[in-house]
């Protein structure tokens, strides 16, 4: 099947068809080009999406990615970035292997098509010229034959007429011969041109046109093959990245399978564990008596008229006994703040308040020592309100619970050690450079590095000092946590072997959320006295009048002698102002009174009341 033989007379249609083929190829090139643009845009959007959800450096969000689920999500984001890179590869390969190549081929195809059809038109014009020559010689031959025939008829007519002279007859005969010769010449010319035209026509339809159409056919078939190869390349470009994309997807699946819910739960414990021990049991309070004297953790009360020892009296005070305060209220335990409020200074214990009642003496360590221990076990926070509003974080992380503080200190120590190693490496490098300068003075002056060595040594010393400081804090926190754990185990073993408390016995000791401790003494070491002795001395003192009211801003666990527990939002009576020692004396109802830190309450004094003073 050849276009030259089958389509010898379809020159114009072949011209239109080949132009349509080039248009189709250009359309396919445009399609691939738009596909590459889509791939680039998709890759860019994937990268932006991955970047958008990447954790920000040195932020709290970055710390959250220690959980396995978050790590899997981060791995997904990284793999999506690689996934986007494969789409960029698709775009680059399609551009270089298809778009650019086909665009160059289209230009060559257009030139070849133009040349082939130019040759076809040239052959067509040549055969048309031969045809015109044939027609011209044919018309001339026809005209000469007609004129020769007329000349012959005129001669015969003149020859038959007797009236015509001989000269006229001879002239007509010569004219007829001339016309006859011209007709013979035109006939010979027409015959020659006709043979030539037939030869040219045969060459045109059997040689030139088939050759030109064969070239056009080959050109069109090459275009079709090239388009098919481009489509195959189009698919191969996609297929080449499928293994890498599959690896990306496999890594996402692998990261998802690596999610460990138990490990994440343990990380939550490590992140938020405070290190405090849970509170113990709430003591039973008997309201059947008309009035119950409040006691601290370190004393027990006996019911009047009963022989059961329920009051643990530490000793007699000078003059009058201290009015003990009830503690361990359920509301106080439930509403205790996460951040412990600042304790009063050791020198400002309620027993040291001027003109105030003296607290009973203890056979164990003094109250000031207890306050000192409290101050050491829980760092000072001078302004709780400023901390709550987002004040600066202390250097020793004393605002954090023990376990969290230990972790922060450990992280700080590790960071300082890394900086020390970095400075030491830098110092070693400078030392080596100085040695090189000493061996080769032309390379540099060794003395120019002395100030850098001194600066490096100073930085190392400073960092070591900082590391020692934080290591000391860390050792202190770790020792305290270990001591608390041992104390909790001892208390747990002690309570397992004792019957549950009944009546007015004091509740078991425990560590409060504010970091202070209460101690428990065995019943054998308790000083047992009758309640009647206590009541007789207590009744001698008249209650102080109220000079105003106060509202508790925070929950306070009054676990020391002379203090009273208050719950946040509770309203009480003020019976003695703060005298500069940081304590305010308050009363609840008619029978409970004691001291609370002034910073824990909002005081509203009645200036007309007796005993109210104005401090400037």
Image (spheres, rainbow, N blue to C red):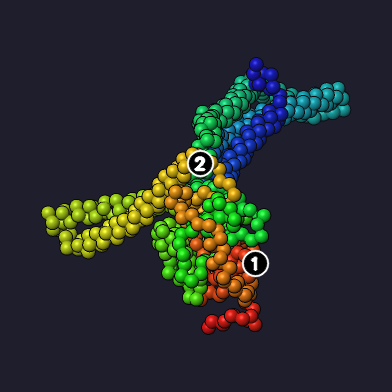
Farthest residue, direction left: 439
Residue 315 at what x, y percent from top left?
45, 62
Please name the residue shown 51% across and 54% down the image.
512
The residue beneath circle 2 is 498
* Dot 2 or dot 1, earlier in sequence: 2
In the rendered image, is residue 120 in sight? Answer: yes
Residue 127 at what x, y percent from top left?
66, 28
Residue 573 at what x, y percent from top left?
63, 70
> How many other residues sit within 10 Å of disc 1, few (<14), some (14-19) or many (≥20)?
few
Q: Is residue 266 above or below residue 170?
A: below
The residue beneath circle 1 is 590
Q: Tag count in the figure?
A: 2
4 relative to 344 in the view: left or right = right
Please name the residue shown 40% across and 51% down the image.
480
Q: Is residue 230 above or below residue 328?
A: above
Residue toward you, 413 or 282? 282
Residue 250 at what x, y percent from top left?
52, 30
Please name the residue shown 37% across and 50% down the image.
479
Residue toward you, 415 or 26? 415
Residue toward you, 79 or 510? 510
Q: Secondary structure at mark 2?
A: loop
Q: Secondary structure at mark 1?
A: loop
In the rendered image, is residue 413 in sight? Answer: no
């Amino acid at each position: 099947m050849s276009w030259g033989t089958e389509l010898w007379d379809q020159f114009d249609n072949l011209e239109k068809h080949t132009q349509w083929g080039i248009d189709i190829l250009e359309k396919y090139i445009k399609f691939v080009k738009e596909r590459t643009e889509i791939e680039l845009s998709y890759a860019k959007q994937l990268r932006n999406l991955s970047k958008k959800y990447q954790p920000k450096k040195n932020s709290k969000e970055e710390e959250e990615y220690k959980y396995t689920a978050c790590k899997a999500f981060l791995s997904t984001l990284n793999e999506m970035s690689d996934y986007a890179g494969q789409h960029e590869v698709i775009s680059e390969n399609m551009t270089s292997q298809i778009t650019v190549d086909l665009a160059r081929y289209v230009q060559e195809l257009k030139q070849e098509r133009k040349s082939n059809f130019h040759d076809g038109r040239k052959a067509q014009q040549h055969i048309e010229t031969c045809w015109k020559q044939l027609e011209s010689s044919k018309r001339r031959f026809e005209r000469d034959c007609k004129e020769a025939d007329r000349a012959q008829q005129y001669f015969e007519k003149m020859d038959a007429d007797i009236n015509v002279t001989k000269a006229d007859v001879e002239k007509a005969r010569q004219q007829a011969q001339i016309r006859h010769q011209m007709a013979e010449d035109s006939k010979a010319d027409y015959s020659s041109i006709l043979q030539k035209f037939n030869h040219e026509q045969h060459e045109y339809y059997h040689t030139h046109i088939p050759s030109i159409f064969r070239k056009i056919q080959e050109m069109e078939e090459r275009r079709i093959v090239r388009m098919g190869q481009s489509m195959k390349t189009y698919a191969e470009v996609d297929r080449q990245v499928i293994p890498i994309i599959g690896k990306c997807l496999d890594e996402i699946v692998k990261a998802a399978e690596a999610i460990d819910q138990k490990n994440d739960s343990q990380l939550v414990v490590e992140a938020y564990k405070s290190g405090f021990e849970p509170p113990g049991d709430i003591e039973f309070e008997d309201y059947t008596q008309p009035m119950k004297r409040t006691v601290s953790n370190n004393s027990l009360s006996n019911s009047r008229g009963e022989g059961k020892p329920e009051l643990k009296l530490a000793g007699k005070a000078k003059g009058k006994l201290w009015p003990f305060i009830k503690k361990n209220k359920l509301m106080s335990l439930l509403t205790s703040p996460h951040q412990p409020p600042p304790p009063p200074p050791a020198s400002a214990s309620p027993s040291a308040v001027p003109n105030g009642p003296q607290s009973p003496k203890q056979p164990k360590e003094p109250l000031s020592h207890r306050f000192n221990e409290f101050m050491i076990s829980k760092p000072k926070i001078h302004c709780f309100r400023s901390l709550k509003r987002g004040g600066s974080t202390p250097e020793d992380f004393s605002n954090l619970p023990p376990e969290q503080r230990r972790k922060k200190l450990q992280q700080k120590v590790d960071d300082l050690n890394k900086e020390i190693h970095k400075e030491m490496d830098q110092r070693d490098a400078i030392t080596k450079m100085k040695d090189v300068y000493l061996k080769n003075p032309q390379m540099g002056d060794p003395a120019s590095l002395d100030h850098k060595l001194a600066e490096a040594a100073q930085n190392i010393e400073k960092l070591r000092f900082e590391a020692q400081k934080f290591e000391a804090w860390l050792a202190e926190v770790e020792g305290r946590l270990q001591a608390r754990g041992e104390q909790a185990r001892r208390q747990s073993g002690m309570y397992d072997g004792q019957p549950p408390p009944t009546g007015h016995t004091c509740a078991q000791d425990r560590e409060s959320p504010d970091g202070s401790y209460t101690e428990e003494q065995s019943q054998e070491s308790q000083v047992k006295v009758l309640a009647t002795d206590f009541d007789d001395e207590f009744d001698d003192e008249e209650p102080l009048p109220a000079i105003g009211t106060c509202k508790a801003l925070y929950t306070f666990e009054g676990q020391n002698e002379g203090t009273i527990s208050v719950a946040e939002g509770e309203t009480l009576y003020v019976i003695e102002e703060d005298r500069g020692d940081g304590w305010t004396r308050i009363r609840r109802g008619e029978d409970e009174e004691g001291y609370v830190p002034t910073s824990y309450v909002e005081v509203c004094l009645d200036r007309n009341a007796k005993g109210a003073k104005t401090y400037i």
